[in-house]
Image: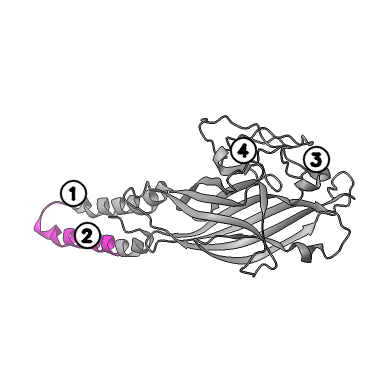
Amino acid sequence: SSCVVPQLKKHGDVPRYLSKNSPLLPMADPRADPSAAAVSSTSTNLVAAPLCEESAYIASCDPKPTVHFTGDWDSNPLLHERVCCHAVIRLIHVDPKDGVFTARVKCHWAFRMQNTQDNSEVLLRGVPGIRIPAVTTTVEESRVWKDVTATEEERKTNHNTVYWKGTSTFLLEGYKIFHMQNFPFDRHVINLENIDFVWRPEKESADYYKSMKVVILTTDLVTVLPEWGTCGAFVKPIKPTDFSEYAQTFNWQLRIERMEWFYIRQVFWLSYLMTIVSVTPLAIPNKEEHLGSRLGVFGSGMLTLVSFKYSVADHLPCVP
């Protein structure tokens, strides 16, 4: 099924993010930027929810881009090779002590090409990829394939053009200075800086032979870490200067925040409980026969707090 691009918000509206449990639409649920206009599709099966204008880029060219590149995008050869990308970014490791982070990025691609009836198109086209000089990027998988859906209603490839789909998986490892003055209520922005969308001969190739023309780029930022939450990803086109037709280079900024209740429940509450239990001997009568019991409970409570401190030290950041 197809999805439709939502009505864009006016510039200055308060950004709103999708809830963490909101479902992902097939391929991409296009998200609008302030300069774009409303885009419609021929399908009305899905209704898109209001999305944050900062988390996506949609070219404001004419005709307006759609996810499956139908209409003029199918018949006009000048509009071929334009790419739609939906990126799912998963944070799998954040270490404020060492100042490192690790993320997995899975990109879902869609584009149209002229139907040349040639079986070697994949070799000529290459595979999509991204270049991020600011971090160490490992390409785990990158491939594309033709959409050869059997039923006529769902078929997007025709005698004029071929509808391509693809997927790429990247592992990103980078460094960042985490400022912990507001722990455990701290928030951080992981700036991936410039990201170039390119065509590579092979997925392991360090060089590329052509820049990609991206007309739709949507992102979803999630985390598998229980102590961290996400506030969405900021997407900004950089190159070319006039990005109304398409963009080739973007800036990604990942916004994360610490789940403060994780530490309140697991650290602070337990330490307070042990402290309260340790002072209960104050209720024991202050007599010589009870002196040993009182000192034993005081000592046990102190040793328990010290051992608890060292056991959770590896999970707590260095706070100035």
Residue bearing mark 4: 32
Which of pointers 2 and 3 lies earlier in the amino acid sequence? Answer: 3
Which of pointers 3 and 1 lies earlier in the amino acid sequence? Answer: 3
The residue most toward the front is 241
Q: Mark 3: few, some, or many residues within 10 Å (few <14, many ≥20)?
A: some
Q: Nearer the viewer, residue 136 or 182?
A: 136
Q: Which residues are magenta?
A: 283-307
Specify the amino acid type for callout 1: Ala
In this view, the mark in front (4 or 1): 4
Residue bearing mark 2: 297
Q: Mark 4: few, some, or many residues within 10 Å (few <14, many ≥20)?
A: many
Specify the amino acid type for callout 2: Val
- Indicate yes or no whether the magenta region holds residue 45: no
Quadrant of the frame with the N terminus: top right
136 relative to 116, above or below: below
In the displayed structure image, the side of residue 253 where residue 212 appears, left or right: right
